[in-house]
Image (tube, rainbow, N blue to C red):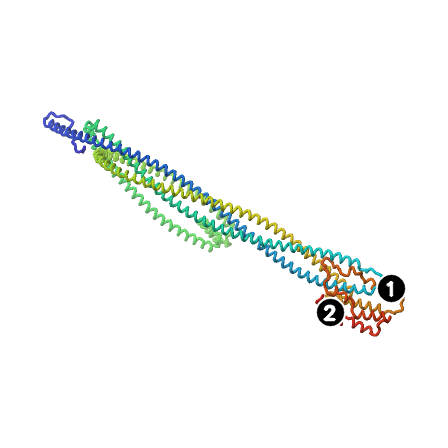
Amino acid sequence: MDIAVVKVPSQQCTESEGQSRLNREELAVLRSKVDSLCEKTLNQETEIKAKSTIITKLEEEKLNLRKQLDTLTQKSEKTTKQLNEITTKLEHVNIEKSSESKNVEKLKQELKNEQEKVHQLEARLQQQVVQRERYEHEACGAEEKLEQFVSQMLRIFDTYSGETDGTKVTWKDEVQLTRLISHAKDVVNENLKHRGRIQELSDRISQRDRQIAERNRTVDRLGEQLTKTAATDRETQNIAHQLECSRENERGLESRVHKLTSDLMDAQVRIRELERQLSQATHEQERALCARLECRLSEVSSRWDSVKSTKLDMEQQIERTERENHNLRDQIRKLESEMANSLIIRDEQRADRDRFFFYLCKLATKARIDQKVASRMEMDELQEAVYTRMGQIASGEFTLLTDVQANADRLSGLNRRVKRLQDQLASKEIQLGLWRDKAATLEAQLNEWSRIRENAEQERTNAERAIARERKTEAENARLCDELTRLRAELLDLNDSKIRCVKVEDKLSELQKANEQLEDVRERQATKIKELRDVIDKQQCELSDHKTRNVESRNNLTEELASTRKTVEQLKRSERELYEFRALVGRLLGLNVETLAVPNYDIINRLENFIANHQLMQLEEPHGLPARNVLSSPTVRSAHHLREPEIHSCEYASGSGVAKAKSKEAWDTSSIRSPRLETRVVRAKHTGLPDRRRSPEKREKSNSPKIVKRDPRKY
């Protein structure tokens, strides 16, 4: 019903019958309207009862849906918890995998380092083997030379054994020979020891080769395990992809659940609003519908008049404020234009200032002021300096302005500038105070204008609210009808939501199955990870064992290197002693060993010649000499002393590097004496005379080393 259409009856009672009739007619109209309103209210009550029954049914369905939603939320919470647990476990698995991959990389690096060390040790072993072979070759050459040299020496000294009488005379160099023999025995023992060490070194090298082969096998195993870890990484990536898909599905389901819950909340809010509106409508219509109509009409008329008056006042105030705003905008525009002009003027002033400063710098250079000093000054200081300099030039001072003078002028200028700036600061402070006062007044005016505007807006809103309230009463019935249609539509939506809930339950069951599958996969991965950890632990143990073995082998190799170096040094020392012994024998025989081509051959040849000459000298002596004089002669004594017992004929010594003589000449007993000497000795024994058919010159020629040619390669 339109309340605004009803006309307000006049309150003043007139005595005229026309007015009473009019009042009666109006009352009859009002009564008819009230009756129609009562009928409408009864109809609305019946509709409200039907709606209440529908609402109760809807509430029951709503409770059922709430229960279903609670169960679904519990299931979704469980699934989310399970998913969170799975994600945490997967994160732990990924962390463990990353740590294991780091350990594997460390193990690979350690293996590479160990392999490099093994290669270095192999290279060192090869170098040591080459050096050992070289030293052995040199030692074999030296031993052969020594054997030949000592065999020749023994063969030469054995020539005295056949010529001596039954008396045994000790040789004067017996101490040296015994020393040589003892050294020879020591060297033989050391050679035997070195052979045993060489055998041990060869055994260790073979062991090292076996260890290298085992390490290569372990490296192959690690490669296979790395391929297995790569396969497990792929499986974990696939599982992570499946997890992401399941999470996306769960997010979609959660979004749908949120939508359903939001729809349910909206439905609940709407139902509550409907209940509240129904209760308000029933109370207002049952208690004071008819009584308030007249009061409302009077109040609305009075309010309408007051609203009109306030509207006029507000329109006037709004016009005033708009005029003031327009004026303020014009002022702001003027100020902005002035600011833009001031900025342009400021830029022009800056350019003029730069030009003026450049001109002052030129003047300073013309006034014989240092250019560096002028460029460091400011404009005021430079003006004062140029001014003072012009005064100096006018007074006749044409000297160049130095830094000290410039600084003094600069200080005076700075003092003046400080005073001027202080005055400017005081004036600017006064201006700031004035501007602050103006700003305070403007703020107060703005606050007043805002307060007036707020009051006007409040009055306008109050008027609009009154009009809206009047219109709301008319639109309540239409809203109720619309709400009934909405409730029916919501019933259909609830049926759709039930179907969706069933679908959500199916999807949740599928998600549970997927979670179970993921748990199975996680357990498999856990078992695989345990196996990989066991393998890695075994590999670490093997690597530690390999490290200890490598350290032990390295220590053994260092010890063997030290022992080989000692043996090499001993061999070098023995060779040095042999060379010294050879040089000493050569000096005793009157030879220089350094100038000889084949020293051993020349020394042995000289010794043979010396012994042969000595024997010839003994044989060429007169036959009638008594035996006492012959024995007492120095030559015979030397011959007796040169004879050695046959015990020492097979051994010799020459320092620390000594070996047994193996040449054919040293062990050939038939070639101890030359055939010429034997024929001469036999001839002298039979005749009792010396062999004087040959001259001494021929004897020297026959016994010279040129005639008796020997193969130097034997020595």
Q: Position of residue 265 (x, y in %)?
A: 31, 36
Indicate the quadrant where residue 484 lies. top left
Q: Residues within 10 Å of mark 1 (few under 14, many from 20)?
A: some
Mark 2 closeness class: few <14, some 14–19, many ≥20 residues within 10 Å: few
Disc count in the image?
A: 2
The amino acid type, in three-letter code, at marker 2 is: Arg
Residue that extends furthest to the top in the rendered view of this protein: 15
Residue 297 is situated, as x and y percent measured from the top left of the image, at: 19, 30
Q: Nearer the viewer, residue 370 or 106?
A: 106
Q: At label 1, which amino acid type do we have?
A: Leu
Looking at the image, is mark 1 or mark 2 earlier in the sequence?
Answer: 1
Q: Quadrant of residue 79?
A: top left
- Could one spot residue 36 in this view of the protein? yes
Q: Would residue 92 appear left or right of 441 to someone viewing this image?
A: right
Please tell me whether residue 579 is drawn above or below residue 403 in the rendered image: below
Residue 2 spot, x, y in % from top left:
18, 33
Q: Which mark is residue 710?
A: 2
Question: From the viewer's perspective, is 633 left or right of 284?
Answer: right
Residue 552, how many percent across, how many down?
Answer: 61, 50
Task: State the quadrant of the C terminus.
Answer: bottom right
User: Which of the numbered marks, if any, corresponds to residue 313?
Assistant: none
Q: Image quarter for residue 580?
A: bottom right
Q: Give SS at disc 1.
A: helix
Q: Is residue 637 left or right of residue 54?
A: right
Q: Nearer the viewer, residue 447 or 260?
A: 260
Query: Is 520 above or below relative to 691?
Result: above
Residue bearing mark 1 = 631
Can you say whether 215 is above or below 639 in the image?
Answer: above
Viewer-nearest residue: 504 or 599:
504
Q: Are marks 1 and 2 in contact (CB under 8 Å)?
A: no
